[in-house]
């Protein structure tokens, strides 16, 4: 009887999910409520978890609850600690969630909210969450080893080395695109710039408090930091209204980029307790708070989606990113649907804290569903904005011009009616002088969040406060990621170069530290600066590179999972990882090749470079560049981007070949050829 | 040492601390006393510093995402 009721419950839930999906997919010509989006997502997640995640756990992985996990075998109270599953879920979620799922959906909204939403849901269920939980499982079976080590172990040193290079390059692109998002959000915004700058002394104060005054009191230092941060946020308004002070904190994009590059270098060589750790505390707690707040806000306010379900830009001619839905929509939304980066987290700290293998679906698959939910909320927040305002914020000046009258005329001609007054009014509401071409996703999301939050608390008067709160929260965890990521890259670089020159491996040497950190900052700084000076807005170029490389990493991780399943002799279930791996390889390779070779200069790097070279040969200056020198820079950057894209394709192809070879080799044996930690220990290999 | 019953608040506290890379200090002490009673145990402050260095330290591990 009880099981019958349960079954009925699942049927009802599936039906509700179906209805919600039907509403968001089929209603045309009238605005739907954002709650439908949330309902469709939640039902999809619950059904996927109950059926697919548990199927993967019991059948595909063959989870053995009696098996001792690394946390128990190596328990040291520090790295290896058996941890309550809800506590570990929180840890894992906090580690995987970042700015990615907030930005991608906002950009994808140019095609309407429906295509992006469908990809987020299908992607997470069939690819993203599968990857996260499979890698968590594989790493747990190997003492919590990292993805790089697993690849080397299962597919040989050649595969390991090219994966390392791929991961390093992806990190560089990630850091530059994140930094670009911050620059775009803070340019010409004294309020935002003041508050984000203020986080530095606030964090240092917290660091000193937590190091010397009350050592280790994280709650106290975070509370102090939070109060100071909110004070800075309130003061930011005063600063922005004071002409002299406002001038001090008003920067154009180029100087802001240089400041962030310099800051990135200094922050990454300072002791961690002084700046990085305290800001990490603040940004983590703020991020969790803002995400929960947004969920509550959407349910309370129940805003209507003003963006159409499918916009005319589904044809690939949109101003936010160029290219048709396949492959470009799928690489624009990476995090939230499938993010290769998570494979590094799932093979990082989490497997060392798992109490029992049976918790892998809940933590690996479940936390990724949660991350996907963040992406759905970002999509909702972008959708509640007036479409005309959305396009004004996300199109580059090359397309819509630099003043409200012209922008309104251009956007209205696309069929999204908007008046200059609406654009200046929207800017005034959020306490900015202009909202035109605030690309990068963060400001758009901030407007959406401000709209939702101000309906719950404070009304229109508070909208500017909430807008800058949202900017602050995004900028803060991006800067934290920049700082921590630069360090990670530094160690990776030292490790890779150290293979040739062993003395470079010494991480205690200041010379090595400064050289390696400097090189890493120079690399992401180059892409950041080229993005900032890119006449087409930068995000246009860098975001597709990032999304593509991120999903290539996911493809590599899923290829590795497939190899392991074959080696375990569980190949009858290998389709679970093989299908998403194949999709990702096809999708990202297509995207990569189109980015390099497509004839349309808006898509293909080489076509774009050709157009500028031809003009240069004629001595003609193409808009929006203003000098021959700028033209030469555009051409050079195009070539760098094309080469980098080529490297990504080669790395993925090489891993695919290694994977196929490893699978073929495993098929020659009748016995499982996988080496898990237990066998390795018994054989004296580990 | 028997494990005392934890409250919801203490779970939330533990979750928030682990989110920033700080595992439960009491569990660490319990573990050290149970397994390595003869060796010194880090104080709460030392434990905090050790974990902080470890989270961002020289092992090149990625502990956050995009």
Image (cartoon, helix red, strand yellow):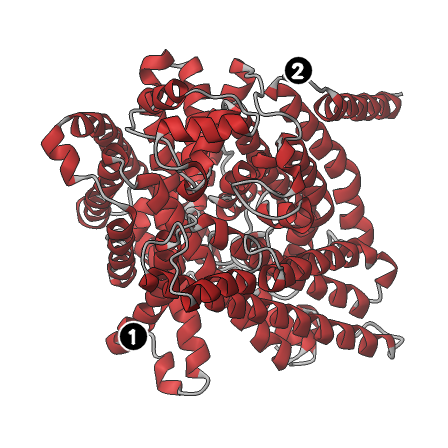
The front one of A79 and A570 is A570
Residue extending farthest to the front is A618
In the image: residue A48, left or right of residue A467: right
* Location of mark 1 (residue): A515
Residue A391 % position (x, y): 49, 32
Q: Chain of mark 1?
A: A
Task: Identify which residue, A606 or A569, lies in the foreground.
Answer: A606
In the image, taking residue A339 as reference, residue A683 lies left or right, namely right
User: Residue A401: x and y, percent?
Assistant: 39, 37
- Quadrant (top left/top right/bottom left/bottom right) for the N terminus of chain A: top right
Q: Which residue is mark 2?
A: A30
Q: Are marks 1 and 2 on the same chain?
A: yes
* Residue A560: percent from left, percent from top: 69, 66
Residue in view at x 75 percent, y 37 percent: A48
Q: Quadrant of residue A588?
A: bottom right
Q: Is residue A386 left or right of residue A59?
A: left
């Amino acid at each position: 009887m009880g099981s019958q009721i349960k079954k009925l419950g699942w049927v009802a839930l599936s039906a509700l999910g179906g209805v919600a999906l039907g509403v968001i997919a089929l209603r045309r010509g009238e605005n739907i409520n954002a709650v439908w989006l949330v309902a469709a997502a939640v039902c999809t997640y619950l059904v996927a978890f109950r059926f697919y995640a548990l199927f993967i756990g019991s059948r595909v992985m063959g989870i053995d609850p009696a098996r001792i996990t690394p946390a128990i075998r190596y328990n040291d109270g520090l790295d290896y600690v058996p941890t309550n599953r809800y506590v570990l879920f929180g840890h894992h979620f906090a580690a995987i969630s970042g700015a990615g799922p907030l930005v991608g959906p906002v950009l994808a909204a140019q095609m309407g909210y429906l295509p992006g939403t469908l990809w987020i849901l299908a992607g997470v269920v069939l690819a993203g969450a599968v990857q996260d939980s499979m890698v968590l499982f594989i790493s747990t079976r190997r003492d919590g080893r990292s993805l790089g080590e697993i690849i080397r172990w299962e597919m040989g040193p050649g595969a390991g080395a090219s994966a390392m290079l791929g991961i390093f390059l992806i990190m560089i692109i990630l850091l530059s695109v994140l930094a670009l998002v911050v620059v775009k959000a803070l340019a010409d915004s004294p309020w935002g710039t003041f508050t984000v700058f203020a986080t530095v002394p606030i964090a240092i104060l917290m660091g000193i408090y937590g190091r010397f005054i009350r050592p280790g009191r994280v709650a106290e230092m975070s509370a102090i930091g939070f109060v100071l941060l909110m004070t800075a946020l309130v003061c930011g308004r005063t600063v922005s209204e004071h002409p002299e002070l406002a001038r001090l904190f008003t920067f154009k994009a180029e100087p802001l980029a240089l400041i962030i590059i310099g800051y990135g270098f200094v922050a990454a060589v300072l002791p961690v307790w002084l700046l990085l750790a305290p800001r990490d505390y603040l940004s983590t707690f703020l991020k969790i708070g803002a995400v929960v707040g947004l969920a509550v806000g959407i349910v309370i306010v129940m805003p209507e989606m003003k963006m159409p379900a499918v916009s005319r830009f589904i044809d690939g001619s949109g101003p936010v990113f160029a290219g048709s839905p396949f492959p470009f929509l799928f690489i624009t939304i990476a995090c939230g649907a499938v993010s290769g980066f998570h494979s590094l987290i799932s093979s990082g700290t989490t497997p060392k804290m798992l109490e029992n293998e049976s918790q892998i679906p809940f933590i690996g698959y479940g936390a990724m569903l949660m991350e996907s939910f963040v992406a759905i909320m970002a999509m909702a927040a972008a959708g509640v904005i007036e479409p005309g305002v959305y396009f004004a914020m996300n199109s580059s000046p090359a397309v819509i011009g630099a003043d409200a009258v012209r922008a309104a005329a251009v956007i209205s001609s696309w069929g999204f009616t908007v008046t200059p007054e609406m654009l200046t009014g929207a800017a005034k509401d959020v306490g900015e002088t202009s909202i035109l071409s605030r690309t990068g996703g963060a400001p758009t999301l901030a407007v959406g969040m401000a709209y939702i939050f101000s309906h719950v608390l404070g009304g229109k008067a508070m909208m500017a406060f909430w807008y800058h709160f949202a900017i602050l929260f995004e900028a803060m965890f991006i800067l934290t990621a920049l700082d921590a990521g630069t360090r990670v890259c530094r160690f990776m670089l030292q490790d890779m170069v150290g293979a040739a020159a062993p003395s470079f491996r010494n991480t205690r040497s200041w010379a090595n530290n400064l050289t390696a950190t400097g090189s890493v900052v120079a690399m992401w700084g180059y892409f950041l600066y080229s993005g900032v000076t890119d006449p087409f807005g930068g995000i246009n170029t860098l975001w597709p590179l990032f999304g593509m490389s991120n999903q290539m990493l996911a493809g590599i991780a899923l290829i590795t999972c497939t190899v392991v399943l074959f080696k375990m002799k569980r190949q009858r279930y290998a389709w679970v990882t093989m299908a998403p791996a194949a999709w990702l390889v096809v999708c990202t390779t297509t995207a990569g090749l189109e980015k390099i070779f497509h004839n349309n200069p808006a898509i293909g790097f080489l076509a774009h470079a050709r157009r500028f070279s031809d003009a240069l040969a004629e001595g003609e200056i193409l808009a929006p560049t203003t000098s021959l020198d700028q033209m030469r820079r555009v051409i050079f950057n195009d070539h760098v981007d094309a080469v980098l894209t080529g490297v990504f394709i080669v790395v993925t192809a090489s891993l695919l070949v290694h994977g196929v070879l490893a699978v073929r080799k495993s098929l020659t044996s009748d016995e499982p050829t996988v080496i898990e930690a237990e066998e390795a220990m018994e054989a004296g290999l580990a | 040492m028997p494990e005392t019953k934890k409250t919801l608040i203490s779970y939330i506290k533990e979750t928030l601390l682990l989110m920033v890379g700080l595992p439960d200090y009491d569990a660490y002490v319990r573990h050290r006393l149970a397994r390595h009673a003869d060796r010194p145990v880090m104080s709460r402050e030392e434990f905090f510093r050790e974990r902080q260095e470890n989270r961002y330290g020289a092992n090149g591990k990625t502990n956050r995402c995009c």
